[in-house]
Image (spheres, helix red, strand yellow):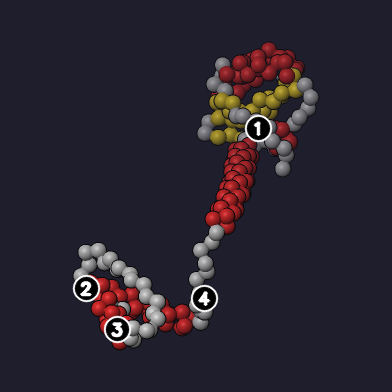
Amino acid sequence: MPKALAQRAMASLGPLAKVDAQELVLDTGRMTTEDVVRYIKEYAKLRDGVSQTLRQLGIERKPESAIPETSDVKTTGSEAETQAAEARSEYQKILSSVEAADRQVQEIEKQVSTLEQLKGTGFSFDEIMSGATGFRRILGRLPFKKLDAAQKALRALLKERAVMMTGAKKNGSVYILVAMPTEDASQALQTLLLYDFIPTDIPNIEAP
C-alpha cells in the first residue's frame, strides 16, 4: 500500500504491536499515474481474455515451473544442437537421394528419346545394337541421290569387308547402316563423309 496509508495503519496498531514491514520504491520511469493505471487496466483485460479463452478450449492452466538450473539449460542446448546436426545430416541424405533419382530420370528420358529417334531410321534395335566382337556399325543419313556413289566408293575401299543396308527415307535422304571390321571403321566413315553423310550416334544402352 502507499507509504502514507501504511504509516497510519501501523500507528493504529499501537506501540506494542509487532509488524514485519518492507519499504519498496516503485519506479515508473516517465509514466504518469494515469499511464500506470491505464496499463494496469489493459493488462487485467488481457489476462481475463486469455483465461476465458483457455477455459473455452478446455486447457488447464498450470503454474509456471521454476527457472531451470544452468546445468539443465546447457544439457538442453547440447541436445538441441545434436538434434539439429542429425536433422541436417538426414536432410543432406534425402537431398542426395532426390538428386540421384533426378539424374536417373533424366538419363531414362534421354534413352527413351534416343530409342524414338532410332525407330525412325527404319532399322530394328537388334540390327543397330548388335554387339558382335570385332565389328563396328555406322548409322546415319545420306542424300538419296548420292547413295549409289557412296556404295560404290565403300565397296572399292573395303571390298567384301563391309555390308551396307538402307532404311527409312526422309526429306530426300535415306538412312544407312554400315557394318565393317572395327579397324576399318575410321576409313569407312571418312569415305561416307565425302558424300554428305550425317552420322547418328549409336548409344551404349541395353536392349529393352
- x, y percent for residue 83: 60, 52
Amino acid type for the residue under numbered disc 2: Thr
Nearer to us of marks 4 and 1 is 4
Q: What residue is pinned by disc 4? A: 62
Nearer to us of marks 2 and 3 is 3
Quadrant, the C terminus: top right
Query: Where on the picture, by quarter, is residue 120?
Result: top right
Which residue sits at x=20%, y=70%? 32
Badge 4 element:
loop
Q: Earlier in the sequence, mark 1 or mark 3?
A: 3
Query: Where on the picture, by quarter, is residue 159?
Result: top right
Q: What residue is pinned by disc 3? A: 11
The correct choice, above or below, for 173 with respect to 192 in the image is below
- Quote the CA–CA distance across marks 1 and 3: 107 Å
Q: How many marks?
A: 4
Amino acid type for the residue under numbered disc 4: Lys
Can you name the residue that lies furthest to the right here?
Answer: 133
Q: Nearer the viewer, residue 194 or 58?
A: 58
Q: Earlier in the sequence, mark 2 or mark 1?
A: 2
Nearer to us of marks 1 and 3 is 3
Q: Earlier in the sequence, mark 2 or mark 4?
A: 2
Q: Earlier in the sequence, mark 2 or mark 3?
A: 3
How packed mark 2 is, by other alpha carbons closer than 10 Å (few <14, some 14-19, many 20 or more), is few
Name the mark on residue 33: 2
Amino acid type for the residue under numbered disc 3: Ala
Q: What residue is pinned by disc 1? A: 203
- x, y percent for residue 179: 71, 24
Which residue sits at x=52%, y=34%? 171
Can you name the residue that lies furthest to the top here?
Answer: 157
Which residue sits at x=55%, y=59%? 69
